[in-house]
Amino acid sequence: MWTFRNFIREFTMPTITSQRDLVRYVVKVTVFALVISLAADLTTQIVFFTSWTAVLRTAVVTTLTVGVIAIPVSWMFGRAQRDLQEAKRRLEAISRTDPLTGLPNRRALIEAISSPTPPRTAMVIADIDQFDAINDNHGLRTGDVVLQTLARTIEAHLSDYGLVGHMRGEEFALISFETPVERIVNVVTDLLRAVERTPIITPTGAVKVTMSAGIAIRGPEDTFEKLYGDADEALSEAKRAGRSQLKLSGQARQAALSGEAAGRMNLILKL
C-alpha cells in the first residue's frame, strides 16, 4: 500500500544495487525536483504576472538550475547508497562463509535448514579420520592445506545435491533437499572412495587421508539441532567401525532400504 512515508523513503533511503538503479534514481529525483520548482515558479508568475516571455525565461532558468544541482547531487548520494548496500551484502556474505575453505559456514547451514524446507531433507556430516594425527605429524599448515583441498573435493562431488558447508574443524556437511536417500548414499560413497585413493599434495609431501560420514533425514518437526544430532550420531557409529566408513541414522536407514535399490544399499552399508 502506497503511503507518504514510503514515498519519502524512495528518495532518502533508496534501494540501489546496480548502475541501472542508480540512473533511475537520478532521473526520479531530478524530475521530482523539476516538477516542484516549476510549480513554485508557475504559482509566482500567476500571482505576479508580467508577460509570457518572462514566464518562459523563468521556466528555462529553473530547469537549467535544477539540472545543474539535482543531477550531480542525486548521483553522488545514490552512488553512496549503492556502495553502502554493496558493503552490507559483502559483510553478510563474509559472516556466512568459512574463511579457510571458502565454503558456507555453520551459520549458513543453520539458516538453510531453519527456513521452510521440503519434507524430504537430508544432512550428511563427513569428518576426516584421525585428523589430529595429521596436524601432529605434518604441522598445522599441512592440516590447513588438507582442509582446503578436501573442501574443493567435497564441493565437486556433492554441490549438485544441496548446500555444502564447513561446520567446524575437520567436519564438513551437506544439506540436501528432495534428493532420495539412496542417491545420497551413492554419491557420498563415491566421495569417500575418491578421498581414500587420492593422496593430498602438501608442502611437506603427499598425505593419505580418509573420511567417514553419517547421514540423517529430517522428521516433519525436526530442528537443525535434531537433524544435526542424528547425523552426528551416525557419524560416531561410522568412526567406531573404522576408517572410510558410512553409516545412516535409523530413519535414514529405513528410507534407504525401502526403495528399489535396497539390495545395493545393503551391500554399501553392510547391513
Image: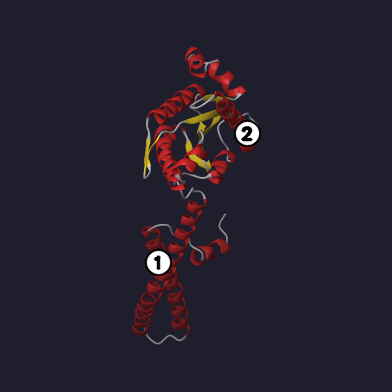
Q: Position of residue 174 (x, y in %)?
A: 50, 35
Camera-side residue: 129 or 248? 129
Q: Quadrant of the C terminus?
A: top right
Residue under the image location 54 percent in, 30 percent down: 122
Q: Which residue is mark 2?
A: 229
Furthest toward the front, the residue is 137
Cα separation, mark 1 vs mark 2, equals: 52 Å
**Please, what is the three-letter code of the amino acid marked with disc 2?**
Gly
Q: Position of residue 81 (x, y in %)?
A: 46, 64
Camera-side residue: 160 or 53? 160
Residue under the image location 55 percent in, 26 percent down: 238
Display coloring? secondary structure
* Residue 208 visible here: yes
In the rendered structure, the answer to whether residue 43 lies left or right of residue 201 reads: right
Q: Quadrant of the N terminus?
A: bottom right
- Circle 1 residues within 10 Å: few <14, some 14–19, many ≥20: many
Q: Position of residue 31 (x, y in %)?
A: 41, 68
Question: CB under 8 Å between callouts 1 and 2?
Answer: no
Residue under the image location 46 percent in, 60 percent down: 87
Q: Residue 26, relative to residue 241: is it above or below? A: below
Q: Position of residue 115 (x, y in %)?
A: 58, 40
In the rendered structure, the answer to whether residue 153 lies left or right of residue 248 reads: left
Mark 1 element type: helix
Mark 2 element type: helix
Q: How many marks?
A: 2
**Please, what is the three-letter code of the amino acid marked with disc 1?**
Val
In the rendered structure, the answer to whether residue 245 lies left or right of residue 24 reads: right
| Chain-order first, disc 1 or disc 2 | 1
Q: Which residue is mark 1?
A: 26
Q: Nearer the viewer, mark 1 or mark 2?
A: 2
Q: Quadrant of residue 145?
A: top left
